[in-house]
Image (spheres, rainbow, N blue to C red):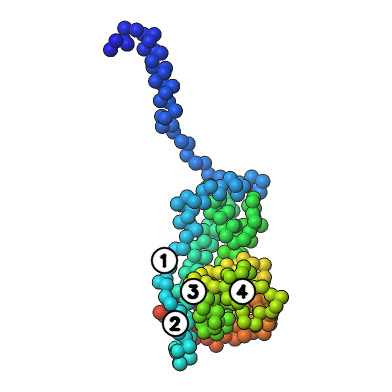
Amino acid sequence: MRLLKYPLLMAITALVLYALYFPFMDTAVPEEEPLVWHEPLEHPLRTDVMGYVRSEQVRKRLAYPTPAPAKKPLPDFDAIADINEKKQAFFAYLGPHVARENSRLRALRKQLLEMQAQIEKHQPLTVQDYAFLYALYDEFRMDVAHTDDDSFNELLRRVDVLPASLVLMQAANESAWGTSRFAVEGLNFFGQWCFREGCGLVPLYRGEDQFHEVARFESAAASIRSYFYNLNTFHSYEELRDIRAQLRSRNKPVRGEDLAQGLLRYSERGEDYIAEISGMIRFNCPIMLEVQQVVAISPSC
């Protein structure tokens, strides 16, 4: 109350208090302005938006839409005498993991198509939209610092499903229906290689001038995830992605036997390998359709 008698002292005190407390006062933060897709030079750089990738919103958009199947030990397929029963058990074991990979790819692709529709209508995209987009460029092995129509369309060619019929028949072929050494000891169902010493299992008949190993995986899910990544990203399987994109452009179903034609570089056997996988798809499709009643694998033969 004594300060009321000294106006000058009161004014000085008020200024000091303002200076002390103003830095800690809440200030209004302007709402985030959406970034608009204009001409290529107007697009945001990758470095401008990648800080948003860790946001909860973007992480949810990138996540699997379905929970992971329960982790189960590899069945002893050699012990199953009945051939049809063995095949059914094989499809039932790997099928849920194939279905989960495809469910994520469908969810990601749906979001990309929605973004594409917005772009075509000249509607704005948010910072989170672009963070989601650049995160997918990174995941699918596309070195894109500045997005444009070409890179967006190439991403759509990669973010797409692989029919369960193709996946399961390659797994059966490469792992001898889950009985090979690499499947039993390394949960590797696709003959995938790695090139770091100790990363996997050394092939018994590896040449003296070769250094590769057959990769070891911690789970069947990891093996299948790696297979999907290989076919959807590496240059060797660009022809497979071309076939799939052409089917999409003609509104045709994406069938395993059609995509098998793009596996020329998967095996040294070339055309013979393609013919074998295609034949296996045709022969085993009825069994896969039976299993589908229990496991929603959608074989798309």
- Closer-to-camera residue (11/242): 11
Residue type (three-letter) at the residue carrying disc 2: Pro
Q: Residue at x 55, y 88 (%)?
A: 283
The residue wearing badge 3 is 220
The CA distance from mark 1 to mark 3 is 15 Å
Check disc 3 and report its element: helix, strand or loop.
helix
The CA distance from mark 2 to mark 4 is 24 Å
Neighbours of disc 4 within 10 Å: few (<14), some (14-19), many (20+): many
In this rendering, which labeled residue sits more in front, label 2 or label 1?
2
The residue wearing badge 1 is 67
The residue wearing badge 4 is 213
Judge whether 26 appears above or below 286 on screen.
above
- Is 173 left, or right, of 206 in this rendering? left
Q: Residue at x 51, y 48 (%)?
A: 52
Q: Position of residue 19 (x, y in %)?
A: 44, 22
Q: Residue at x 43, y 66 (%)?
A: 66
